């Protein structure tokens, strides 16, 4: 069971990606989906309207063409039937034929009527079967083609009546030689004595099929003809719209309605009848659906392309990142610096170069730290030894001093007391001391040297009283004086120690002698901490101690200069920042 915070964290991780790969996929997907959705909504609305208008206009146009064709057919039937009526050329012959009782004249008139009817058929190709008939008995007269048995016009689907004419919707032809749908007309011969004589006329057998051609719509269509009584007179879909079914009241010409799952379009004629197109909804929406499916296919293809680009970009990024991660792991695993492998991408190569340089610097720093740690360990051991040895020396000297005092040897007592003070000061704690303390220790040191050396020398110290409390590095003067004493002066030698404050921020310490001196090149070499010539000249550890102390406490803020010339003595000048009493840790500020 997941806890609620953990579940929330998992959901948040799925929604808000943290990896570069997921971010790239999300960005490219959204950058593709959002325009596709916006364009899709606008396009679908526009294209749906355009396509619907196009389909509707096409249906209206085709339906109007059907209506006009039907009107032309009916008009043609009307025109042709007028020639068979009483006021027509054939009509007069048929009246004479019906009125004349002489057999010979009737035979001649019958031949002329048949000839005229055949001529009418040949000059009007849209006319098929036609004949006269007597209403009531349905006796057929002068048929131009073979008539099917059982003729009864009462059984034909009439869809409009005009005065003495009745138009019949598409029905099976009465021509015994064919089995096609035709339009037909019955017309009364309105003459005295022939009230039961009518004309029957059909369209050509293929005409109706041509008018109701479904291929012109480009979709599944069924036609209806609704008569003036709003009843279905002709149907191509008897299961849903049987003949005789009451149909909806006529609306605006060309209007569209929906009955069930079918779209209804209609065109009304001036005579009151209507031609109706019934289109299944699936067929009507087929073209729109095809366009929508094409759009979905394009959208899916665009998403696939976006994912491919995301994968390509990820592959472009992952190799440099892998190399960068390898460089990072090499640091965490303390691996040695290896050869840099570039990626060929300027931005990543720049970062790799900088990181590789940083890695080299870190490795060097680690090596320096290791070296420093080893030195620190050695110094700690030496410090422990140095803390042990002074106690032994002090205790031994105190024993000797008290022994000398008990034996009345005052010179030895004074000498040991002085030595003890020098050792105590030199081995004392603290990095700095006041000038007064440094000078007192220097005087004790010189007292010891007077006993040691057999030649006479003089030391002169120059310092202002108000500067005695200024702080300078501990054990700084003694090494400088010792070097002058050991390696410079002889009989009647002179050592000058001059301490002065320069302006308000610096102290200058100058130790000079009138000894044998040295060449300027040798003096310059003594300033180098690891110069072997210093050992050859017997400088010992005094000068290295001074140089290291100055570098440790003041860094670049301190300055040491040696001025010497062979036969003219040596002068060592040190310039350091001012450290007032009570501020021994100011060197830390100098370092920072």
Image (tube, rainbow, N blue to C red):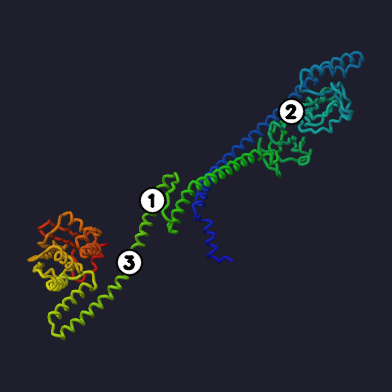
Q: Which mark is residue 376?
A: 3
Farthest residue, direction bottom: 406
Q: From mark 2 to mark 1, how far is it between C-alphas?
A: 84 Å
Which quadrant of the figure contains the N terminus?
bottom right
Provide the residue designation for mark 1.
354
In-image side of 110 versus 8 (left or right): right
SS state under label 3 = helix
For marks 1 and 3 on the same chain, the one whose residue lies earlier in the sequence: 1
Residue located at (79% from left, 38% from top): 243
Crowd around label 1: few <14 · some 14–19 · many ≥20 (10 Å): few
Residue located beneath label 2 in the image: 210
The percent coordinates of residue 17 (x first, y second) are: 51, 55
Labels 2 and 1 touching (C-beta < 8 A):
no
Q: CA distance from mark 2 to mark 3?
A: 113 Å
* Quarter of the figure with residue 464: bottom left
Q: Residues within 10 Å of mark 2 (few under 14, many from 20)?
A: few
Can you give x and y, in whole percent of width and height, for residue 168 in the image? 78, 31
The crowding category of the residue bearing disc 3, from other C-alpha atoms within 10 Å (few below 14, some 14 to 19, many at least 20), is few
Of the image marks 2 and 3, the number of the one nearer the N terminus? 2
| Quarter of the figure that contains the C terminus | bottom left
Alpha carbon distance from label 1 to label 3: 32 Å
**Left/right of residue 327 with respect to residue 447 in the rendered view:** right
Q: Tag 2, which secondary structure?
A: helix
């Amino acid at each position: 069971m997941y806890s609620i915070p953990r579940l929330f964290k998992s959901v948040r991780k799925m929604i808000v990606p943290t990896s570069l790969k997921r971010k790239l996929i999300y960005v490219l997907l959204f950058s593709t989906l959002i325009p596709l959705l916006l364009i899709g909504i606008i396009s679908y609305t526009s294209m749906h309207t355009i396509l619907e208008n196009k389909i509707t206009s096409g249906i209206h146009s085709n339906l109007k063409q059907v209506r006009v064709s039907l009107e032309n057919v009916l008009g043609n039937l009307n025109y042709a039937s007028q020639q068979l009526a009483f006021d027509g050329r054939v009509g007069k012959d048929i009246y004479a034929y019906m009125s004349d009782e002489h057999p010979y004249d009737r035979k001649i008139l019958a031949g002329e009527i048949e000839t005229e009817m055949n001529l009418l058929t040949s000059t009007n190709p849209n006319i098929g079967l036609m004949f006269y008939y007597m209403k009531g008995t349905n006796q057929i007269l002068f048929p131009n083609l073979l008539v099917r048995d059982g003729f009864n016009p009462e059984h034909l689907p009439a869809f409009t009546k005009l005065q003495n004419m009745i138009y019949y919707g598409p029905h099976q032809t009465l021509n015994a030689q064919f089995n096609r749908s035709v339009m037909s007309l019955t017309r009364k011969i309105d003459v005295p004595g022939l009230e039961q004589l009518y004309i029957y006329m059909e369209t050509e057998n293929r005409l109706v099929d041509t008018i109701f051609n479904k291929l012109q719509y480009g979709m599944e269509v069924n036609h209806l003809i609704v008569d003036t009584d709003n009843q279905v007179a002709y149907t191509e879909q008897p299961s849903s719209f049987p003949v005789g079914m009451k149909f909806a009241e006529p609306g605006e010409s060309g209007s569209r309605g929906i009955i069930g799952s079918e779209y209804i379009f209609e065109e009304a004629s001036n005579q009151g009848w209507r031609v109706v197109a019934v289109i299944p909804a699936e067929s009507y929406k087929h073209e729109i659906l095809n366009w929508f499916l094409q759009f979905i296919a394009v959208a899916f293809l665009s998403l696939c392309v976006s994912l491919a680009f995301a994968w390509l970009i990820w592959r472009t990024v992952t190799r440099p990142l892998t190399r960068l991660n390898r460089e990072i792991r090499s640091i965490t695993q303390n691996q040695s610096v290896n050869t840099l492998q570039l990626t060929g991408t300027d931005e990543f190569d720049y970062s790799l170069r900088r990181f590789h340089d940083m890695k080299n610097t870190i490795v060097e720093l680690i090596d320096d730290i290791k070296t420093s740690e080893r030195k620190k360990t050695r110094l700690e051991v030496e410090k422990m030894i140095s803390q042990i040895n002074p106690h032994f020396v002090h205790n031994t000297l105190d024993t000797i001093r008290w022994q000398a005092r008990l034996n009345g040897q005052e010179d030895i007592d004074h000498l040991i007391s002085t030595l003890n003070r020098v050792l105590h000061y030199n081995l004392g704690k603290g990095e700095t001391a006041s000038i007064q303390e440094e000078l007192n220790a220097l005087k004790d040191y010189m007292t010891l040297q007077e006993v040691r050396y057999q030649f006479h020398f003089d030391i002169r110290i120059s310092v202002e009283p108000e500067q005695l409390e200024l702080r300078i590095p501990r054990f700084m003067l003694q090494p400088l004086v010792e070097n002058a004493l050991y390696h410079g002066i002889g009989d009647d030698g002179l050592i000058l120690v001059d301490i002065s404050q320069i302006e308000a921020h610096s102290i200058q310490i100058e130790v000079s002698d009138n000894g044998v001196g040295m060449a300027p090149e040798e003096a310059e070499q003594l300033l180098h901490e690891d110069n072997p010539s210093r050992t050859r000249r017997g400088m010992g550890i005094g000068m290295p101690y001074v140089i290291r102390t100055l570098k440790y406490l003041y860094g670049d803020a301190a300055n040491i200069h040696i001025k010497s010339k062979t036969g003219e003595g040596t002068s060592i000048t040190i310039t350091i920042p001012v450290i007032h009493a009570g501020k021994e840790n100011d060197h830390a500020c100098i370092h920072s």
